[in-house]
Amino acid sequence: MDLDSADPFNILRQLIPLLVSLLDDVLIVGLSRLGCNLPYLEWLSPIVITGTIVYLSVQFWQSPFGARKFNELRQKFEQKVLET
């Protein structure tokens, strides 16, 4: 995360996955302690975790370091395969 920028909307946009994950946990714990057994409640956590992982993966891939590093590793791998 690049928290150096002073734009509060940029910081909020980068913290959205964390906030959604925390909201998910609050809903699961709070509703289960109140005795609410909702059928979709057990599926809520894996869906939010999967969405968060996909979001963070896309953000990392779109960063210059992510795609560049992947291409460097792929080229090194191809060179080693061609050497053998």
Image: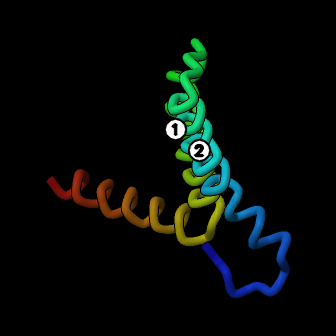
In x, y percent, where is residue 35? Answer: 54, 23
Q: Is residue 14 above or below residue 30?
A: below
* Residue highlighted by disc 1: 29
Screen quadrant of the N terminus: bottom right
Q: Residues within 10 Å of mark 2 (few under 14, many from 20)?
A: few
Disc 2 marks which amino acid? Val
- Tell which of 72 and 64 is nearer to you: 64
Q: Would you identify the image quadrant in which residue 67 lies? A: bottom right
Q: Residues within 10 Å of mark 1 (few under 14, many from 20)?
A: few
Disc 1 marks which amino acid? Val
Secondary element at tag 1: helix
In x, y percent, where is residue 54? Answer: 58, 43
Q: Which mark is residue 26?
A: 2
Asked whether the residues under the numbered discs 2 and 1 touch, taking CB atoms below 8 Å apart as contact, a structural biologist would say: yes
In x, y percent, where is residue 26? Answer: 59, 44
Secondary element at tag 2: helix
In x, y percent, where is residue 44? Answer: 58, 28
* Residue furthest front as drawn: 34
At horizontal 84% and vertical 80% (from top left) the residue drawn is 7
Counting every numbered tag in the picture gives 2
| 84 relative to 14 in the view: left or right | left
What is the CA distance from the residue labelled 2 to the residue labelled 1?
5 Å
At horizontal 70% and vertical 56% (from top left) the residue drawn is 16
Q: Would you identify the image quadrant in which residue 74 lies? A: bottom left
